[in-house]
Image (cartoon, helix red, strand yellow):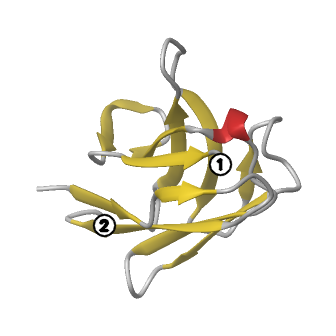
Amino acid sequence: QVQLVESGGGLVQPGGSLRLSCEASGVRFSGNIMGWYRQAPGKERELVATLTSGGTARYGDSVEGRFTISGDNRKNTIWLQMDSLNPEDTAVYYCNARRPWTPTYSYWGQGTQVTVSS
């Protein structure tokens, strides 16, 4: 059974930083794509960043240059380092594990709230 557990969310001031973690069980990084998505109130879920087992990262346009995704295959954990946060980054952040070209293989964590406010 696949489980993804996010942690690290919270309240931060504009310009600040946070680091999110996602611990995965029941899924191997190899052959899968791990990622972060977010959903703000009244908006659709959007891509934040993804990471392949080979180390290729992809970012959403709104976070490019400010956020960094990383992972450790041995620990089955990925992280999202978020810098220069602004109020538009406020959202629930979700961890995702999916297998390319296999729509039925996609799992989500419960989400962690990130609030950027002064």
Q: Which mark is residue 24?
A: 2
Residue 49: give its label: 1
- Residue lying farthest to the left in this orientation: 1
Of residues 15 and 69, the one drawn nearer to the viewer in this rendering = 15
Position of residue 38 in the picture relative to residue 60 (left or right): left
Badge count: 2
Q: Residue at image x 49%, y 69%?
A: 78
Q: 108 or 98, which lies in front?
A: 108
Please tell me whether mark 2 sits on a helix, a strand or a loop. Answer: strand
User: Where residue 86 appears, x then y in whole percent?
Assistant: 76, 44
State left or right for residue 1 relative to residue 86.
left
Classify mark 2: residues with Cα within 10 Å, few (<14), some (14-19) or many (20+): many
Q: Relative to 6, say whether 109 is above or below.
A: above
x then y, percent, for residue 27:
28, 63
Say which of 94 and 8 sits in front. Answer: 8
As helix, strand or loop, the secondary structure at mark 1 comes to strand
Q: Earlier in the sequence, mark 1 or mark 2?
A: 2
